[in-house]
Image: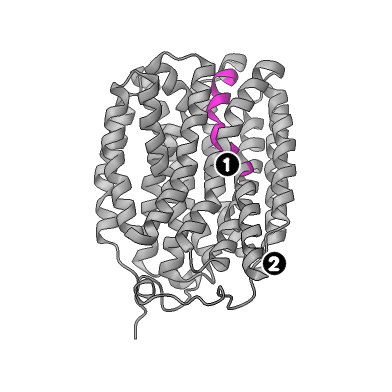
Amino acid sequence: MPDSRRWRIAFAGFLMQMALGAVYAWSVFKAPLTRQFHWSTPDVTLTFTICIFVVGFAAFFGGLWNNKSGPRLVALTGGFLYGLGVFLASFSADKLWWLYISYGVIGGIGLGFAYIIPVAVLVKWFPDRRGLITGIAVGGFGAGALITAPLATHLIQSIGVMHTFAWLGIGYLIVSMGTGYFMQNPPEGYKPAGWSPSATLSAQRATTDYTLGGALKTWQWWALWFLLFLNSSAGISLISQEAPIFQELTKATAIVAAGMVGIVSIGNAFGRVFWAWISDMLTRRWTFAVMFILQIALFWLLPNLTAASVVTVISFIILMCYGGGFGTMPAFAADYFGSKNVGPIYGLMLTAWGFASAFGPLLIANLRQSTGNYVSGLHIISGIMAISILLPIFISPPRPRV
């Protein structure tokens, strides 16, 4: 029974993350909002930045709350606040500050609370497939924009951007709360029937469960934080500007660009599962090294391309690497610090995602505004990836002092 139950919980977690991952379709709101209310691109981008920044800190507190009250309550609260925040954004007509508070702060808090729960729950249900299952858990998050981008674009053109926020908010609330109800931890000491870790696997994992305070005293926790920050900064800079980048490079229409956003979002979802699965064989650190090498080349090439098909393929692979960071890092954290307290340990690590959301999108948006194109921003990100490759090369597991 527990073995079949864990797959049902995994499926619910995937659907929950799909609803949460709709936030990645933000770029399709950018043009309608700037056109209707005459806000600047950086002003509108700041909404997304605030939301993701808040997510990182809310995930930490959600992880702590999860340890005290269990996953179901945290998931239900997160789903409610997320849907409420998006719904309240529909009342922000000509009030930019209200968009920041509703979509950015309230929605971001809900996202953070809800996001950490499937990750923290499933690493305990799947000690035998830690990388793969965390990839699947957050793969839904990457797939959220696949459905939301074309749906939101259609709704915006049919009923306007404010009414679109209202209907999407209601939908997010229903789906995320409905699936959040299924979140629960396994029995203490749970292991799948007949499974025990191999010697190779044991050598890559912590010999004890670290507390949050103990993890923070190791240099490895901070190295993982920077790995996530650097990888997230690269990918989220593209995500925040996808639609306008595609239109500028390929001269595509808004509808075509929205379709491209939906297609490349599959890369975000697929990368979370693919790279997490690869990391079970290649190791987590070398998986990050490969992803960084790919991004060095792809970000440098991207601004020189004009064919929509090629831009879509390159962006798809970049988003695979971005998603791969989120698919691989929960297992990385559980490997190095144990699964017992992975909620607060990885939850606090997600502040890296929050800081990346402030760094990457604002960097590329402001460079676009000052230079008139995206070339400089994309090339600078390529350079950042070249420096970042040093981290996964030198990191190693923490070993308790004896």
Identify the main secondary structure in magenta.
Answer: helix
Picture quadrant of residue 383? top left
Which stretch is magenta?
19-33
Task: Examine the structure image and report whether residue 282 is included in the region drawn in magenta.
Answer: no
Q: Amino acid at mark 1?
A: Gly
Q: Residue at x 67, y 60 (%)?
A: 183
91 on left or right of 388? right
Q: Which mark is residue 92?
A: none
In the image, what residue occupies the spot 56% across and 73% down? 192
Q: Residue at x 66, y 31 (%)?
A: 98
Q: Considering depth in this image, is 211 or 181 the residue closer to the camera? A: 181
Q: Nearer the viewer, residue 276 or 219?
A: 276
- Pinpoint residue 353: horizontal percent, then vertical percent: 47, 47
Quadrant housing the N terminus: bottom right
Is there any visible trace of residue 30 in the rendered image?
yes
- Residue that mark 2 sits on: 69
Give the residue pinned by disc 1: 21
Disc 2/disc 1 C-alpha distance (Å): 25 Å
In what element is the residue under mark 1?
A: helix
Above-or-below relation of 3 to 181? below
Residue 159: give x, y in percent of width and height.
72, 18
Foreground mark, 2 or 1, reads: 1
Seen in the picture, residue 162 relative to 316 is either above or below; the reply is above
Q: Secondary structure at mark 2?
A: helix
The image position of residue 312, as x and y in percent, is: 41, 27
Q: Residue at x 46, y 32 (%)?
A: 264
Q: Quadrant of the C terminus?
A: bottom left
